[in-house]
Image (spheres, rainbow, N blue to C red):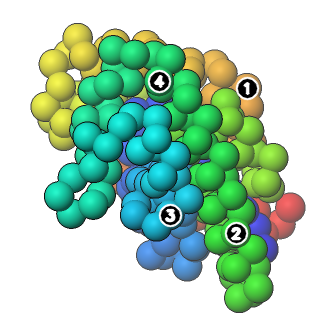
Amino acid sequence: MRTIGITGGVGAGKSTVLAFLEKECGAFVIQADKVGHLVMEPGEECYEPVIRLFGKEIIKNDKTIDRKMVSDVVFVQPEKLEKLNAIIHPAVKRYIRRSLEEQRERRRNLCIVEAALLLEDNYQDFCDEVWYVHTDREIRIARLMESRGYTREKAENIIASQASEKFFRAHADYVIENNGNLGETFDCILKGVKRNETL
């Protein structure tokens, strides 16, 4: 089983790459962000610790955690964000490792782990290689303004707060160029998968 870690900045189009890998290459895809939501569901590992951290007022009528309220709090209280990350991040990693083990037992050939902070949080420790999805800055800004309704300033600020292209390229084993021509992007992905098979 090959496990590929996929990372890249906001607006790079990672979801397009993941969808192609899942549909066309039969890959099992798991996203850290989605797992982060999952582990905060009632009965899951982080539910009680997060409520202890933020108080019972974050519980909605349906017993789920009000993530919007949590994000509003951590926005103005950075120390709470640190504590939240200390609860969520290790749980997400444990969940992903368990999922990969299950896929290994099912004889899955290809698994994909996607995380915005893949390198910063050392996900590469359990990936065979790291792919970086690269998209030109202006295209990313346009995508964020169109898909998320961000102002240009907000899009630029978010991009500036993330790791640089130089950092990603320095730590990646393979780069997917995703600048708008989907045919070229998909060819690049297939080359990467075939390259994988010959390693």
Going 76% across and 85% down the picture, which residue do you hit? Answer: 105
Residue hosting label 3: 44
Distance from Cα at disc 3 to Cα at disc 4:
20 Å
Going 65% across and 71% down the picture, which residue do you hit? Answer: 99
- Identified by mark 3, the residue type is Glu
Q: Residues within 10 Å of mark 1 (few under 14, many from 20)?
A: few
**Mark 3 or mark 1, which has the lower sequence index?**
3
Seen in the image, is 180 located left or right of residue 191? left
- Please state the horizontal and vertical placement of residue 121, each as a whole percent of the image: 68, 36
Residue hosting label 2: 98
- Identified by mark 2, the residue type is Arg
Asked if residue 186 shows in the view, the reply is: no
Residue hosting label 4: 80
Seen in the image, is 144 located left or right of residue 83? left
Distance from Cα at disc 3 to Cα at disc 2:
14 Å
- Identified by mark 1, the residue type is Ala
**Mark 3 or mark 4, which has the lower sequence index?**
3
| Marks 2 and 1 in Cβ contact (< 8 Å) | no
Relative to residue 39, is residue 99 depicted above or below? below
- The kind of secondary structure element at disc 1 is helix
**Mark 2 or mark 1, which has the lower sequence index?**
2
Name the disc covering residue 100, or none: none
Distance from Cα at disc 2 to Cα at disc 1:
29 Å
Q: Nearer the viewer, residue 42 or 126?
A: 42
On-image quarter of the N terminus: bottom right
Seen in the image, is 28 located left or right of residue 105? left
- The kind of secondary structure element at disc 2 is helix
Name the disc covering residue 170, or none: 1
Distance from Cα at disc 3 to Cα at disc 1:
36 Å
Relative to residue 137, is residue 89 depicted above or below? below
On-image quarter of the C terminus: bottom right
